[in-house]
Amino acid sequence: MTHAAIKDLKDPISYFFLSMLVKTAIAAYFNRIEVRGAAGLPKDGAFICVANHTSRWDGLVLGRLIDRPSTFMVHPNELRGLQGALLRKVGAFPANPKSDFAGFVAERFRYNEPFVIFPEGNVFYDGQTHPFKKGFARVALTAAQNDLDVPIIPLAVGYQWKQRKIVVSVGAPISVLEYRQVYAANPAETLRALCTSIHREVLALRADLGFEADRKQLLAVNSGLHFMRS
């Protein structure tokens, strides 16, 4: 099978100026950012940041928190026109199941770049975390098969709009090396198990931040209902 090629189009100068613009925009609109577990966000080295997606601010907020060149998987519609050109300059590439995105990201890990993904696949404004697609799990397991110990960092982000406050909770890093052997034997079930596990972690972080809809979802997941998308 031939995969569509993905190119890394990051540009250091564009990254510097756009990151300054993002920091200015966030500081101008929001009064405060509260980050729980900030020490769990690595200052160097590769990792996979898996977060919920409830606002178009999310990508900007995570870029501001990570504060170093990263790779982002985004919906192809976000990469159109001038916006798309700018996003590519700071590390964005389109989600495309026909591309070898897992191999591409694994290669960026060798440059110690973080990978940021919103596995719901879209922005949802209803206040709850939706089912996860499996792409991030495939990236993590591909890296593990290439002997790269790249942890997954689950992260929850939310907003208190009246107070113009951002709330973030960073979870403990999760290694996927233990999944390597079972992934080789049963890829589909391993992807499902890892996806369900990380979804549960994000729900728990959101519940701790006080988001009631996700607290209820967490109870359902813990009762044996799995939330996962193909």
Image (tube, rainbow, N blue to C red):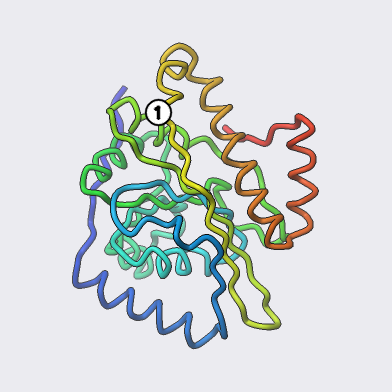
Q: Who's the residue at 52% across and 60% down the image?
A: 37
To which residue does mark 1 refer? 177
Left or right? Give the position of 74 relative to 165: left
Q: Quadrant of the N terminus?
A: top left
Q: In the rendered view of the protein, which quadrant contains the C terminus?
A: top right
Q: Position of residue 52 (x, y in %)?
A: 58, 54
Residue 132, x across and y down, in percent: 59, 41
State whether residue 170 is above or below residue 3.
below
Q: 101 or 41: which is nearer to us? A: 41
Q: Position of residue 117 (x, y in %)?
A: 46, 50
Residue extending furthest top?
185
Quadrant of residue 164 within the rendered picture:
bottom right
Determine which quarter of the picture holds residue 98.
top left
The quarter of the displayed image where residue 192 is located: top right
Compared with 93, 13 (above or below) is below
Helix, strand or loop status at disc 1? helix
Above or below residue 169? Residue 4 is above
Q: Is residue 87 left or right of residue 58?
A: left
Q: Residue furthest bottom?
A: 28
Q: Is residue 111 left or right of residue 136?
A: left
Tell which of 117 and 76 is nearer to you. Answer: 117
- Amino acid, disc 1: Leu
Residue at 47% over, 48% down:
153
Residue drawn where x is 76% and y is 45% of the image = 217
- State the count of labels: 1
User: Mark 1 Cα within 10 Å, few/some/many (few <14, many 20+)?
Assistant: some
Q: Position of residue 226 (x, y in %)?
A: 70, 32
Task: Name above or below for residue 121 compared with residue 185.
Answer: below
